[in-house]
Image: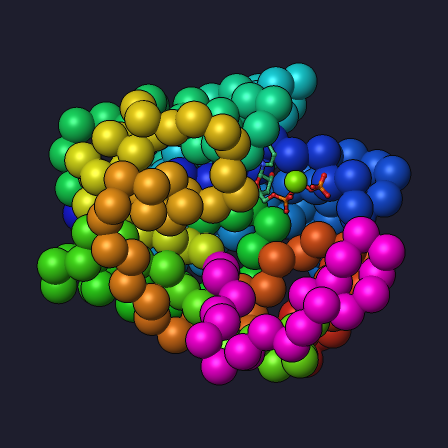
């Protein structure tokens, strides 16, 4: 494998409600992060996995993942971007392709990992998996009055794993200013073209209780 995967997993999971940090919340009896790492490790291209864990849970996460796959665990930061930067700094020499993948996308199929990695290998410096936007999108003012309807056909909902030529991601993080919610955003600011590949419904981000319930149902149905 020529791919390192960074897994930001240091978030609290405020929108999921009170409980353990989100990466350690249970899905079908196992922490979300176990599901995520198991699927990453099942992708043949993946050589290295670096997880950014909640600071208080670093050794617990190491113990949790040791039976699943060889994984490096580092303390995360206060913002997602800082967690990604911490994980990036821990990638050993070797892998030329770096993927960044949310721990919260626990049911992401290994085939999506491979398709993103393959697009980087084919020459795209930055690659994101996307889905079409299904709802009509309105722009509103501060008083919730509609300003207009956005042309949905030109919009995409963005998932992870996002894939990068290693040097491109490193340069983007060195130059990073304001925290953004994805890594392709940093690369865009560097003027690097970002290529889209088809995403997967199973790569949904487990954000709210509804998403966790949906993931439980997908697993119960063999998904
Ligand atoms: N993340 C991280 N470090 C942070 C914040 C987020 O590593 N300081 C990670 C989360 O663990 C998650 C991914 O970034 O895997 C996407 O973030 P999100 O879904 O927003 O997770 P949380 O920040 O944990 O959730 P919330 O915003 O509801 O608190
Ligand atoms: Mg968050």
Say whether residue 143 is left or right of residue 123. Answer: right
Q: Is residue 5 above or below residue 132?
A: above
Q: Is residue 142 magenta?
A: yes
Residue drawn where x is 37% and y is 48% of the image: 184
Q: Position of residue 144 (x, y in %)?
A: 84, 61
Q: Number of labelled discs?
A: 0
Say whether residue 158 is left or right of residue 193. Answer: right
Return the residue found at the far front.
147
Residue drawn where x is 52% and y is 66% of the image: 157
Residue drawn where x is 31% and y is 26% of the image: 175
One can see residue 212 in this view: yes
Magenta residues span 139-159
Q: Quadrant of ligand 1?
A: top right
Q: Is residue 93 above or below residue 137?
A: above
Say whether residue 161 is left or right of residue 56. Answer: left
The residue nearer to you, when weighing 188 against 54, is 188
The residue nearer to you, when weighing 109 against 179, is 179
Q: Position of residue 12 (x, y in %)?
A: 71, 34
One can see residue 41 in this view: no
Q: Position of residue 115 (x, y in %)?
A: 29, 67
Q: Is residue 174 magenta?
A: no
Image-quadrant location for residue 170 = top left
Quadrant placement of the C terminus: bottom right
Say whether residue 125 is left or right of residue 69. Answer: left
Residue drawn where x is 65% and y is 34% of the image: 11
Q: Position of residue 164 (x, y in %)?
A: 26, 47
Q: Is residue 3 above or below residue 174?
A: below
The residue nearer to you, when weighing 217 against 14, is 14
């Amino acid at each position: 494998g020529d791919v390192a995967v960074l897994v930001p997993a240091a978030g609290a999971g405020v929108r999921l409600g009170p409980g353990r940090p989100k990466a350690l919340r249970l899905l079908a009896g196992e922490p979300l992060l176990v599901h995520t790492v198991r699927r990453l490790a099942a992708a043949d291209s993946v050589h290295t996995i670096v997880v950014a864990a909640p600071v208080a849970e670093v050794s617990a996460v190491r113990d949790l993942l040791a039976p699943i796959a060889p994984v490096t665990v580092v303390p995360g930061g206060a913002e997602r971007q800082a967690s990604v930067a911490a994980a990036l700094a821990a990638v050993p020499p070797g892998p030329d392709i770096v993927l960044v993948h949310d721990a919260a996308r626990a049911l992401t199929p290994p085939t999506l990992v491979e398709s993103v990695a393959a697009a980087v290998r084919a020459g795209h410096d930055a690659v994101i998996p996307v889905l079409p936007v299904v709802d009509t999108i309105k722009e509103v003012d501060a008083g919730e009055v509609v300003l207009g309807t956005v042309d949905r056909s030109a919009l995409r909902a963005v998932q992870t794993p996002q894939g990068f030529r290693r040097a491109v991601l490193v340069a983007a993080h060195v130059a990073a200013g304001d925290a953004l919610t994805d890594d392709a955003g940093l690369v865009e600011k560097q003027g690097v073209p970002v290529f889209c590949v088809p995403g997967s419904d199973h790569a949904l981000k487990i954000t709210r209780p509804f998403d966790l319930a949906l993931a439980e149902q997908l697993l119960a149905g063999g998904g």
